[in-house]
Image (cartoon, rainbow, N blue to C red):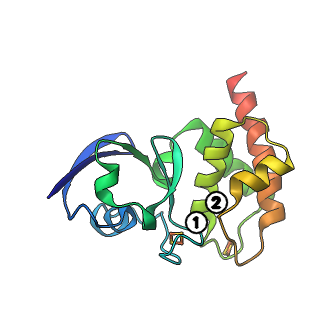
Amino acid sequence: MAVTLTINGKRRTFDVPPEMPLLWLLRDVAQLTGTKFGCAAGLCGACSVLVDGVRMFGCQTPAGDAQGKSITTIEGLAEQPLGKALMTAWNEVDVVQCGYCQPGQIIAAAALLKDNAKPDDNAIDAGMSGNICRCGTYPRIRTAIRRAAAIHAGEKA
Ligand code: FES
Ligand code: FES
């Protein structure tokens, strides 16, 4: 069965079973491997993508549910002003340790900043809940989100 969706601004059709997890479609079929496979159980957030601007876990989202929707992966976010602000901040703060969780963390941060351009620590903790970092980079992630918010606000001004 065909599933048609927009990925990073390009409308694409895939001949996949509708029950295939979106994560599988993105990584194994569309060859967009920036989105990571962690637990496959909705517990880690490594597979986070934006579906019509809302953070979703790709491992828990059937491809058929994404039919007609707009998907943004870390590759697409990297081309957007908000994504560039986040990646600049991530580099400035030197957030990354092993890096495996970080695409999902940045997608979650983008969803947060789309809703709340200047989140406080409580809002950051709430927005980032569900994204696990086994290296414990949480303090640097908080700092980088605040820095990204400032950079992005400056870009808009
Ligand atoms: S791989 Fe999807 S939540 Fe862990
Ligand atoms: S940087 Fe290693 S799991 Fe987060």
Check disc 1 and give the amino acid type.
Answer: Gly
Q: Position of residue 156 (x, y in %)?
A: 68, 25
In this picture, residue 71 sits left or right of residue 148: left
Q: Quadrant of residue 1?
A: bottom left
Give the residue displayed 37% in from the left and 39% down from the top.
9
Name the residue tied to disc 2. Answer: 105
Say which element carries label 1: loop
**As shown in the figure, which amino acid type bears the numbered disc 2?**
Gln
Mark 1 Cβ and ligand 1 under 8 Å apart: yes
The image shows residue 109, relative to residue 80, as above or below, that is below
Crowding around mark 2 (Cα neighbors within 10 Å: few <14, some 14 to 19, many 20+) is: many
Disc 2 C-beta below 8 A from ligand 2: yes
The residue at which mark 1 appears reads as 45
Q: Percent position (x, y) of residue 91?
A: 72, 56
Q: Mark yes or no: residue 92 visible.
A: no
Q: Residue furthest top?
A: 157
